[in-house]
Amino acid sequence: MKTSVVGLGAMGAGIAGNLEKAGLLHGAWNRTAANGEKAAAEFGFPFTADLAAAVSDADVVITSVSMDGDLIEISEKLAQLLKPGSIVVDTSTVAQATAVKAAEIFAAKQVSFIDGPVSGGPEGAKKATMVMMLGGDADIIEKIKPVTDAISRMAIRMGDNGAGQATKAVNQIMVAGINQAVTEALAFGQASGLNMDDVIALISQGAAGNWFLEQRGPNMTKDIFTPGFKMVLHNKDLNICKNMAADLGVSLPVIDNTLTDYATLLEQGHGDDDISTLYRTKKAMFQK
């Protein structure tokens, strides 16, 4: 199954690398060629400078972009280039309505669309351990199983187009809550004079243990915030979640509180830090 990747950022590069290892990669393109070439060299796959050449005759195209507008723009371009019967799988995090609109753009050209946002971060993309939340036709999702098997450890159909993005919203709200809980608790522990390496090692093995604590805790308590998942992107995702919640007639405190904290951090220039940069605001609570 010839598969191309469009967008070779933190997630797309790892996806392309695993497709190359599986013998499925047909082409790999990035809007900024220099960044695409760098990613190709790092992850070991050939870079294609021309979009048409990258997706020509592809059976499946995986897109990975940052913003809703980017997805609509690239969808309109791809719709003119792809053969009828091909499949587009978008791994971006966008609004549910944006995924539905992209599906309509492709349907007009007899191209199937699956919204397939992912969780697991760049590490998961690199190691093919991320999970995929798929929205779209069940038969099409079954057809692309060799591709999803090559780039993820789990891919589940959540419903029709848009359901994948709705599931990702659940994930991003939960990430915000975990981020709030872990950073606040560790800041409390540090202010109490505890050895934080010991705290993290011990608590990670108990009822409060979680991936974020284990993977980000040791760095954040040393004021190291290398991404990871950039805070500016989670901020974007939570604004999507906020709008979706508003459509349901509710306001969720974990979203509102995290967006307030992120606004402060963005003003301070920390947008490109890992989301664990939230620790900065929690430490400040104990320094008043």
Image: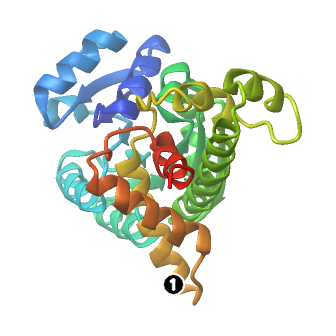
Name the residue type under label 1.
Ala
> Considering depth in this image, is 212 or 55 the residue closer to the camera?
212
Q: How crowded is mark 1: few (under 14 residues within 10 Å), some or many (20 or more)?
A: few
> Considering depth in this image, is 272 or 54 the residue closer to the camera?
272
Asked if residue 18 lies left or right of residue 268, the reply is right
Asked if residue 32 lies left or right of residue 181, the reply is left
Q: Which residue lies furthest to the bottom in this view?
A: 249
Q: Where is residue 160 drawn, in percent x and y?
A: 57, 65
Q: Residue visible at 12% across and 27% down?
A: 33
Q: Where is residue 92 drawn, in percent x and y?
A: 40, 49
Q: Where is residue 285 drawn, in percent x and y?
A: 54, 55
Q: How is the image coloured?
A: rainbow
Answer above or below: position of 133 versus 152. Answer: below
In the picture, residue 214 is in which quadrant? top right
> Considering depth in this image, is 78 or 43 the residue closer to the camera?
43
Q: Residue visible at 35% across and 26% down?
A: 13
Residue wearing tag 1: 246
Can residue 99 be seen at all in this image of the molecule? Answer: yes
Can residue 49 be seen at all in this image of the molecule? Answer: no
Q: Residue visible at 55% across and 20% down?
A: 127
Answer above or below: position of 253 versus 231. Answer: below
Quarter of the image that includes the N terminus: top left
Q: Is mark 1 on a helix, strand or loop?
A: helix
